[in-house]
Image (tube, helix red, strand yellow):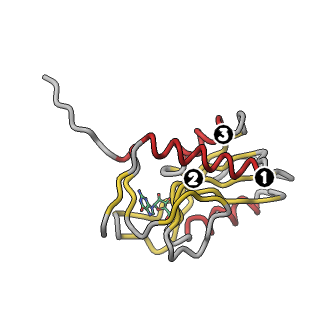
Amino acid sequence: MDKVYLTWWQVDRAVFALAEEIRKHFMPDVIVGIARGGLIPAVRLSHVLGDVELKVIDVKFYKDIEERMEKPKITIPLHGSLEGKKVVIVDDVSDTGKTLEVVIEEVKKAGAKEVKVACLSMKPWTKVVPDFYVFRTDKWIVFPWEEFPVVVRE
Ligand code: 5GP
């Protein structure tokens, strides 16, 4: 699969674009960041939107670029209640959409009053189109936090 490499600067601009869209339509009480890929955008968004409370959920699905497990598995569940809260779920990318499906269900089970999804990117084939996203691509995205600049020091 072709890859597209993003820089920190591009990701940060994308986060600001997301924040602007979210602010226009929906001010969340809580952001739910999906580990690992959604955490950095989720932390950044929670600051940019004005110190919105952040909760974390961890879902494992991919073993490698094109190798998935049978279905996404929650490895760290949501902590505490979301009773009556307006929630934005944040992930890096909606690919098959299956991770988001599982998380949306969990967030609703936790009592959220309104649920929206924000991703930096989406694939054209996803079954969960985020309410807010910045760009579409059919390539494998490499985020800046996934790269290892090799610096060898003696
Ligand atoms: P989905 O459940 O939508 O297939 O996949 C969701 C998760 O898989 C994302 O949260 C992300 O961590 C990972 N993923 C899917 N596609 C990509 C991609 O193109 N690049 C990276 N870095 N991760 C991806």
Q: Position of residue 29 (x, y in %)?
A: 78, 45
User: Mark 3 belongs to which amino acid?
Assistant: Ser
Dot 3 beta carbon under 8 Å from ligand 1: no
Q: Which residue is mark 2?
A: 34
Residues 79 and 34: in front is 34
Q: Amino acid at mark 1?
A: Phe
Q: Residues within 10 Å of mark 2 (few under 14, many from 20)?
A: many
Hey, which quadrant is residue 9 in on the image?
top left
- Name the residue furthest top: 154
Q: In the image shown, does 23 or 65 lie closer to the viewer? A: 23
Q: Quadrant of the C terminus?
A: top left
Mark 1 vs mark 2, CA separation in Å: 19 Å
Residue type marked 2 = Ile
Front disc: 1 or 2:
1
Which mark is in front, 1 or 3?
A: 1
Left or right of 104: which side holds 137? Answer: left
Task: Relative to 12, say whether 6 is above or below.
Answer: below
Judge left or right: residue 97 versus residue 146: right
Foreground disc of the pair 3, 2? 3
Comparing 137 with 66, the one in front is: 137
Instruction: Please state, as top left, top right, bottom left or bottom right, where the N terminus lies in the image.
Output: bottom left
- Mark 3 or 2 closer to N-term? 2
Circle 1 packing at 10 Å, graded few (<14), some (14-19), many (20+), is some
Disc 2 residue lies near ligand 1 with CB under 8 A: yes
Work out whether mark 1 precedes mark 3 in sequence or the reverse, and give the earlier one. Answer: 1
Q: Which residue is mark 1?
A: 26
Q: Residue furthest left?
A: 154
Q: Residue 2: percent from the left, percent from the top?
A: 30, 67
Q: Secondary structure at mark 1?
A: loop
Helix, strand, or loop for circle 2? strand
| Residue corresponding to mark 3 | 46
